[in-house]
Image: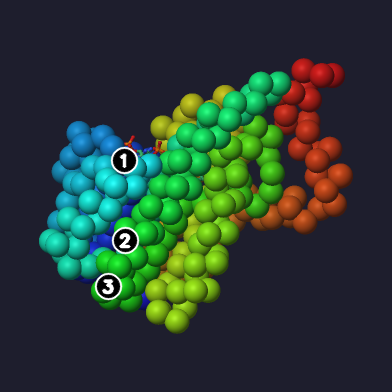
Amino acid sequence: MMKADWSNRRVWITGASSGIGKALALELSREGARIVVSGRNAERLAEVSKACAGEVWVLPFDAADRKATCEAAREVDHAWGGMDTVVLNAGICEYIDLPAFDATSVQRVMDVNFMGIVYGIEAILPLLRKGHLPHLVGMSSTVAYTGLPRAEAYGASKAAIRYLLQALRIDLLAEKIDVSIICPGFVQTPLTDLNDFPMPMRISAEESAKRIRKGLERRAHEIRYPTCFALILRTLAVLPSRLRTRLLATMSPNWQRAR
Ligand SMILES: NC(=O)c1ccc[n+]([C@@H]2O[C@H](COP(=O)([O-])OP(=O)(O)OC[C@H]3O[C@@H](n4cnc5c(N)ncnc54)[C@H](OP(=O)(O)O)[C@@H]3O)[C@@H](O)[C@H]2O)c1
């Protein structure tokens, strides 16, 4: 897709009230896209809308709520008659702290990150079928490439998203609906501001939005960045399992406590 093609393109971004989603809304609105911004916090969405250059529709809903997602999609369908690009980006992160293993934490993360995308696909696919050069985009992470310490919940949700979208890409080929998966490394946002560990190669949300826009324009199957960070994780993933496990164990607080 040429750069100019964002003009009047209908784009729906979830998780647009802060961080990567907000930066992407600003980036695409500058390019002339018409944007629906979603998240739960209506006030922050209104601020994003004010900061955007062009037409923006604030549509708050809880991504983990199937009914609310369907209602939001019905509203958009009624007003805009379809959707061209959907970026299912809403997400949360919780780390697991062993020796306690808390299933409710895993449930919360899966409900928002994975089921949120599942509900989004169910609700918005009919709109994409009426769209121009339709493009379905989901937010995974480089964490999906291999198991990482404390990421049992978050990483599992992102790996599940990656698989879901890889499979859907095959099934949607016949309908000419492109599917892109976003796999960032560390990006500076309110989500990573809470992290209490070093975050190598962390980039800004603005830089992240530029990388996503360029990837979307290429219709890349997987938009991964920073390149070097993604390469390190992909290399770790193909190491012999015993070697990878020993290397990564040094980063695990449970390992450090036991020594
Ligand atoms: N930052 C990174 O390093 C990084 C790396 C890889 C992947 N990611 C992924 O990128 C996405 C955006 O994260 P971010 O870093 O930009 O974090 P963020 O600033 O915390 O943004 C998360 C967004 O998700 C929305 N959200 C959370 N729970 C929701 C729910 N139940 N319903 C609807 N919206 C919800 C939030 O909006 P409300 O609070 O208004 O609901 C917010 O707009 C996430 O999927 C994250 O996993 C981030």
Quarter of the figure with the N terminus: bottom left
Amino acid on which disc 1 is placed: Asp
In this view, the residue in front, 245 or 185, is 245
Asked if disc 1 is less than 8 Å from ligand 1, the answer is yes
Rendering coords of residue 178 (x, y %)? 43, 72
Amino acid on which disc 3 is placed: Gly
Amino acid on which disc 2 is placed: Ile
Residue located 45% across and 81% down the image = 174
Q: How is the image coloured?
A: rainbow
First of labels 2, 1 by sequence position: 1
Q: How far apart are labels 3 and 1 at the CA level?
A: 24 Å
State the residue position of label 2.
124
Rendering coords of residue 89 (x, y %)? 40, 49
**Which mark, by number, is residue 131?**
3
Decide: marks 3, 1 in contact (CB < 8 A)? no
Image quadrant of residue 85? Answer: bottom left
Q: Is residue 192 above or below residue 15?
A: above
